[in-house]
Image (tube, grey):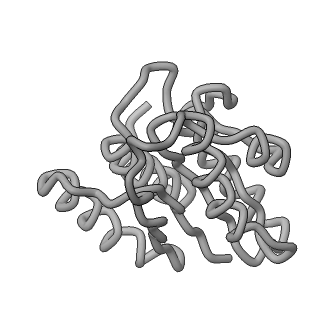
């Protein structure tokens, strides 16, 4: 199985980029993993929030197909512990899935069309984070999930 993190907009902060790169390097020892970036919309200030979500949503849905499962990382999603998330990943791997796509949306979240098309949602936290920071938190948790599954000493209960 391959895991993809689909994000809206670039990661601009140098310290967040460095942290993400560190976990990308660590993850390659466990599973094929990549981050795909949907470019920022041009002139988003000329769009209403709903129009921006709709345009971003259309771009997100282009990644959804029958060979993958998409999971929204969304405050309305279910909350899992790190161990719970590792079990979630393990079940997806055991299901024979070709690709698991996690999605972090734009600043206003997801469009109705995305919510209607994607059935699984996980919360990164009940707290709100900038989208760039949520990317780092997610890749760290994915690394933690694999270290738990492999019985490695990274995670402490």
Q: Is residue 45 above or below residue 128?
A: below
**Residue 10, horizontal then vertical, whole percent:** 33, 60
Q: Nearer the viewer, residue 58 or 137?
A: 58
Q: Horizontally, is 41 left or right of 101 in the view?
A: left
**Residue 39, horizontal then vertical, whole percent:** 42, 66
Q: Is residue 60 above or below residue 110?
A: below
Residue lying farthest to the left in this orientation: 14
Report the residue at 74% width, 48% height from top: 114
**Residue 95, horizontal then vertical, whole percent:** 84, 66
Position of the N terminus, as image quadrant, is bottom right
Report the residue at 68% width, 41% height from top: 111
Q: Horizontally, is 98 left or right of 127 in the view?
A: right
Residue lying farthest to the front in this orientation: 46
Can residue 11 be seen at all in this image of the molecule? yes
Q: Horizontally, is 10 left or right of 147 in the view?
A: left
Question: Across the whole image, how many numbered discs are drawn on residues?
Answer: 0
Q: Nearer the viewer, residue 42 or 5?
A: 42
Report the residue at 50% width, 42% height from top: 47
Q: Horizontally, is 111 left or right of 43 in the view?
A: right
Q: Is residue 8 above or below residue 106?
A: below
Can residue 152 be seen at all in this image of the molecule? no
**Residue 157, horizontal then vertical, whole percent:** 44, 30
Report the residue at 58% width, 54% height from top: 56
Q: Nearer the viewer, residue 33 or 152?
A: 33
Q: Is residue 20 above or below residue 154?
A: below
């Amino acid at each position: 199985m391959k895991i993809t993190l689909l994000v809206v907009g670039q990661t601009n902060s140098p310290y967040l980029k460095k942290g993400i790169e560190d976990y990308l390097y660590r993850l390659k020892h466990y599973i094929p993993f990549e981050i795909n970036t949907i470019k920022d919309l041009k002139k988003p200030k000329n769009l209403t929030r709903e129009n921006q979500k709709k345009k971003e949503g259309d771009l997100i849905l282009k990644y959804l197909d029958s060979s993958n499962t998409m999971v929204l990382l969304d405050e309305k999603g279910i909350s899992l512990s790190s161990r719970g998330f590792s079990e979630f990943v393990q079940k997806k791997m055991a299901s024979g899935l070709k690709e698991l796509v996690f999605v972090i949306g734009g600043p206003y979240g997801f469009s109705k069309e995305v919510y209607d098309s994607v059935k699984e949602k996980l919360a990164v936290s009940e707290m709100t984070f900038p989208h760039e920071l949520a990317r780092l938190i997610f890749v760290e948790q994915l690394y933690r999930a694999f270290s738990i599954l492999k019985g490695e000493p990274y995670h402490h209960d």
